[in-house]
Image (cartoon, rainbow, N blue to C red):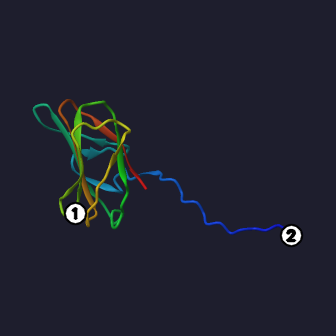
Amino acid sequence: MAGIFFNLPDAPSPPTWVPHFDNTNWTATTGSWDGSKWNSADTGPGGHVINLQDAGAWTSSYRPTKLRISFSVAPSWGCALLDSNVDVILAEATVVDGVGYDITFGSFDIDSIQLSHAGGAWSLTNIEFLE
């Protein structure tokens, strides 16, 4: 007797962290890319900032659920992710290295990320989105 086989639907893939980190994905409006990481710019007494603008079309209709960033020091610092309507879609006053933070989208695409630290120079070593 032949076996009975059922054609079951594929299980959904688990979400994965996807890097969108380097200068093919972002352009610095404040700070700089050195070929392997983003470096902060001194913005005055006690402040260092990295502001990145999306580069290319990768953000068009892109809707990840979380943002995770890694950096060279463990400062007390803030992060804002803005959409193309300049609405804040993620805001955290104190970001922890390697922790995922929820993104709340409206109708617009990712446009920029703003990172600040009230201390010495630092570097951004990874930007990932949960898909």
Which residue is tagged 1?
84
Secondary-structure class at tag 1: loop
Residue at 10% across, 32% down: 45
Give the percent coordinates (x, y) of residue 126: 37, 44
- Give the quadrant of residue 115: top left
As rendered, which of 96 and 105 lies closer to the eye? 105
Give the percent coordinates (x, y) of residue 106: 25, 63
Using residue 6 as the reference point, say whether residue 43 is left or right of it. left
Which is more foreground, mark 1 or mark 2?
Answer: 2
Residue at 19% across, 30% down: 119
User: Considering only order in the chain, which callout, 2 or 1, is on the residue closer to the N terminus?
Assistant: 2
Q: Amino acid at mark 1?
A: Ser
Residue 52 appears in the picture as rendered: no
Q: Is residue 74 above or below residue 22?
A: above
Marks 1/2 in contact by CB < 8 Å: the verdict is no
Residue 95 appears in the picture as rendered: yes
- Give the quadrant of residue 46: top left
In space, the residues marked 1 and 2 are separated at their CA atoms by 58 Å
Q: Is residue 124 above or below residue 111?
A: above
- Give the quadrant of residue 32: top left
Categorize mark 1 by other alpha carbons within 10 Å: few (<14), some (14-19), many (20+): some
Which residue is tagged 2?
2
